[in-house]
Image (tube, coloured by chain):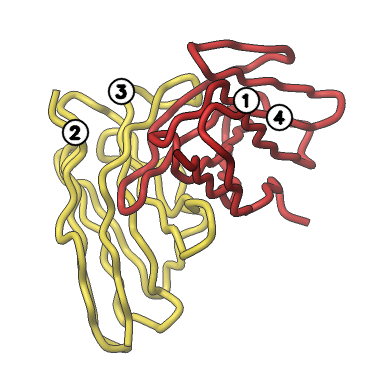
Chain colours: A yellow, B red
Amino acid sequence: EAGVAQSPRYKIIEKRQSVAFWCNPISGHATLYWYQQILGQGPKLLIQFQNNGVVDDSQLPKDRFSAERLKGVDSTLKIQPAKLEDSAVYLCASSLYSGDTDTQYFGPGTRLTVL
Amino acid sequence: QKEVEQDPGPLSVPEGAIVSLNCTYSNSAFQYFMWYRQYSRKGPELLMYTYSSGNKEDGRFTAQVDKSSKYISLFIRDSQPSDSATYLCAMSTGNQFYFGTGTSLTVIP
């Protein structure tokens, strides 16, 4: 079974630029998550999709972050404009269903550095 | 106060030692408790999952939950160098999901 794919693996940008990350979940997984993991901290949930609908985006900074999941499969997360404090690893995860009894499988992450 | 508190370490032990990793929490609504392992430059992977107080064992790993004290633990027996990683506890109310900050563990051969 192929895992969660993410690209790019690394990205360096200057502040005020925009950036986009891509995630391809495990085939058949209905739920997709985006997390932000700042160095030395645990992952923080940014947004959760169930198929192509948003379940939870309460911690997404909506003034600069946006995410979409077209056709309930791939997803993109965008930051525009980026700030220094956005430097982090952005993790995508997927699970078969929704709910906390369901295992989340994580991708390798995209490491973003904002200069 | 953070929802989940976890000592970041780092923790360094000799091979074969028993390792104890712990998290405390403040929200009594947490119902589901998990431990993830994260190797350097990799995403977290689920190690253990439980939803009740008591112990759950899986090979060399034992997860312990004490809801009355709001305290969870992960024990690793006969630790191996391959166990060197960051261990994250995670908890959920059923609607909201929180990770701890992670404990960095190094097992020295």
Q: Identify residue for label 2.
A: A3
Q: CA distance from mark 3 to mark 1?
A: 28 Å
Count all numbered tags in the image, as a single digit: 4
Q: Identify residue for label 3.
A: A96
User: Foreground: B13 or A99?
Assistant: B13
Could you tell whether B40 is left or right of A60 in the image?
A: left
Mark closest to the chain's N terminus, 3 or 2: 2
Q: Residue furthest front?
A: B109
- The chain holding disc 2 is A
Q: Identify residue for label 4.
A: B72
Q: Is residue B103 above or below residue B31?
A: below
Query: Identity of the amino acid at label 2?
Result: Gly
Tag 3, which secondary structure? Answer: loop
| Numbered circle sitting on residue B75 | 1
Q: CA distance from mark 2 to mark 1?
A: 28 Å
Query: Identity of the amino acid at label 1?
Result: Phe
Q: Are marks 2 and 4 in contact (CB under 8 Å)?
A: no
Q: Are marks 3 and 2 in contact (CB under 8 Å)?
A: no
What x and y, as percent, mark residue A49? Answer: 34, 41
